[in-house]
Image: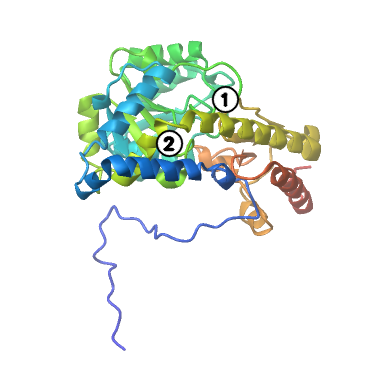
Amino acid sequence: MADQFNYDNFFSAGSQNSAPGSVRHAKYDFAVAYPDPESLPLEDLIESVRSGFEREGRDLAYYSTAAGDPELRRLVAEKLARQRNMKVSADDVVLTSGSGEAVGIVIQALTDPGDVALTEEFVYLGTLNQMRRYGADVVGIRCDDDGIIPEDLDSVITEQTAKGKKVKYLYTIPMFQNPLGWTMTLERRKQVLEVTGKHGIPVFEDDCYADLRFEGEDVTSFHSLDDTGRVIYVGSFSKIIAPGMRMGYLVAPKEVIGRAWSFKSGGAVSQFTALTIAEYMKGGIDRHIEEQNRALAAKRDAMVAALGENFGSSVTWTVPQGGLYVWVKFPEGTDLAAVQEEVFDEGVSYYNGSQFSPSGEGSNFVRLCFGHPSVTTIHEGIAELARILDRKKVFPG
């Protein structure tokens, strides 16, 4: 048998070993923000495919325009105007393969190695990993229940600039923040815009959870509060239809889109998917979101109740008004990172806080997702988590 060819001397310096592998699922999966399979609007989507293809199906013989299906972009612009108070047109919207692609190409367009990217003190690990991949020095800003603390934001920018660092942007998830769960108040958003404006820094608003509100009053977008073009906006259909649809969108000044688009590969998004979503937006999507949010509220309540029943006053947690996550704080000295794999092997999955931290701190926190499991499964899984952690004696003292 011939010797196998060795590629070691041929890989680029920037390549990383991240070969695709199978996705692992624990019996009680509180780690990844999957929707409940039973909640997927499959019949409505099938009908949307049928009606859309009867009207425009033969257009699949052509590649779509680079920005994506014009009809879906128009519907997105109307949705943003109606629900997020944004004054945009279809020409201001480009479609991407999920919001993750939109976030990734903007990060590449704005980031040189060593540049500072600001985020909340805990931030979605997918974005955090992308920032690190492209060489950003990610710095977290302290938060309270109202969102980013403006004074801390101001002092961090001043401190980083004094060090000779270039602060490129503030990335924020202001609605049902992942993983912290809070929604940034209107007053706090105005203060954050004032601070970043003083320093001449863009705000990168990831609003992918905006539709998942099941109680409380809505808060307008950062984008709607700015008239200078300093806010870059990302949204997604993954949380309101299905992650497998892989459809998101980017709203930004044309010069930002032009630079970001230079990092996009593979051309326009799937016209098949865009046509299906556009047709669905004309029909039952609002009803579906209402039904989904009622189910999510019940699941959040189940998780909060289960935490109280099984952990009592030994831990504290957030009670979000929407979204998919409960953020749980264990006593100082508890190391949930150290036992995460062992707990997974025993049937319960979660992400520990250090995975969301730019500084690597927070191993005494966990993010628990309540979107996928049933109410019954949530109660069973939280009880099992408590039993496993007690058996492993992870609590200090």
Residue 237 circle label = 2
User: At 58% from the left edge and 45% from the top edge, which residue is drawn?
Assistant: 38
Tell me the quarter of the image containing the N terminus. bottom left
Res 97 seen here = no
Q: Residues within 10 Å of mark 2 (few under 14, many from 20)?
A: many
Q: Residues within 10 Å of mark 1 (few under 14, many from 20)?
A: many
Q: Quadrant of residue 90?
A: top left
Q: Which residue is mark 1?
A: 182
Which residue is nearer to you in this view: 253 or 248? 248
Q: Is the C-beta separation of discs 1 and 2 under 8 Å?
A: no
Q: Secondary structure at mark 2?
A: loop
User: At 39% from the left edge and 60% from the top edge, which residue is drawn?
Assistant: 19
Tell me which amino acid carries mark 2. Phe
Q: Nearer the viewer, mark 1 or mark 2?
A: 2
**Image vertical order of residue 83 relative to residue 296, above or below:** above
Residue extending farthest bottom: 1
Which residue is nearer to you in this view: 188 or 21? 21
Q: CA distance from mark 1 to mark 2?
A: 21 Å
**Image vertical order of residue 33 relative to residue 175, above or below:** below
Q: Quadrant of residue 18?
A: bottom left
